[in-house]
Image (cartoon, rainbow, N blue to C red):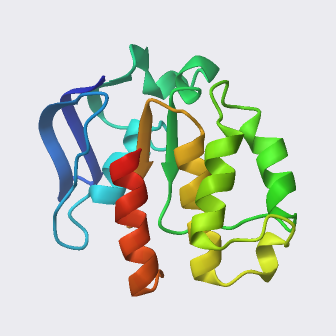
Amino acid sequence: MIVIKDLNFYYSVMNPIFTGLTTEFEQGKIYGLLGKNGAGKTTLLKLIVGSRFWISGSITVGGYESWKRLPQMYEQIVILPEQFQLPMVRAEDYVKYFGAFYPKFDYGQLQQMLLEFEIPSRRYLTEMSYGQRKKFLISFVLATGARYVLMDEPTNGLDIPSKMKFRSIVAES
């Protein structure tokens, strides 16, 4: 479970983003964050994974305090950011390097999703279009076996058929 208690965060005293935010996200459910641009959706995801620090309150992921950034927590959570840069490696090498961080990584599931998205695993990630890279990362994060999968604007950059396929894959996962 992801538990947020009395979270306070602001970029400046004049610009509070969260004041006393308390909520829980249960494992096995799909949640959506809705709000206007600048409302703090991406910021909340960064706070949850410990890549940004809050003023006061607490966030725990699977019982681990996210600000501590423990490897045991990162085995349970994965994030697909809206903006990303990928190294100049083949997709299959990326999987070999980064899949090892997730003890429950499912290589068979990854291959199935890459086939559905028509993503070649022997191609360099930097040679793929933005949409192809996004589909590769969607496939990767879903194959990690992480308890908590956070996605920031996951369908941005995807064509309509890929968005439909994304919904189907997430529903199956």
Q: Nearer the viewer, residue 27 or 78?
A: 27
Q: Residue furthest top?
A: 63
Q: Nearer the viewer, residue 67 or 70?
A: 70
Q: Nearer the viewer, residue 99 or 19?
A: 99
Image quadrant of residue 168?
bottom left
Q: Residue at x 71, y 32 (%)?
A: 101
In this rendering, is residue 97 above or below 132? Answer: above
The quadrant of the rendering that contains the C terminus is top left
Residue 133 in sight in this render: yes
In this rendering, is residue 75 above or below 142? Answer: above
In this rendering, is residue 52 above or below 134? Answer: above
Q: How many marks?
A: 0
Q: Residue 60 location in percent, x, y?
A: 35, 22
Describe residue 17's horizontal placement relative to residue 73 as left or right: left
Q: Residue at x 65, y 37 (%)?
A: 106
Q: Residue 138 location in percent, x, y?
A: 54, 59
Describe residue 7's horizontal placement relative to residue 131 as left or right: left
The quadrant of the rendering that contains the N terminus is top left
Describe residue 106's horizontal placement relative to residue 48 as left or right: right
Q: Residue 96 location in percent, x, y?
A: 83, 44
Describe residue 101's horizontal placement relative to residue 117 as left or right: right
Residue 152 in sight in this render: no
Image quadrant of residue 121?
bottom right
Q: Residue at x 21, y 55 (%)?
A: 33
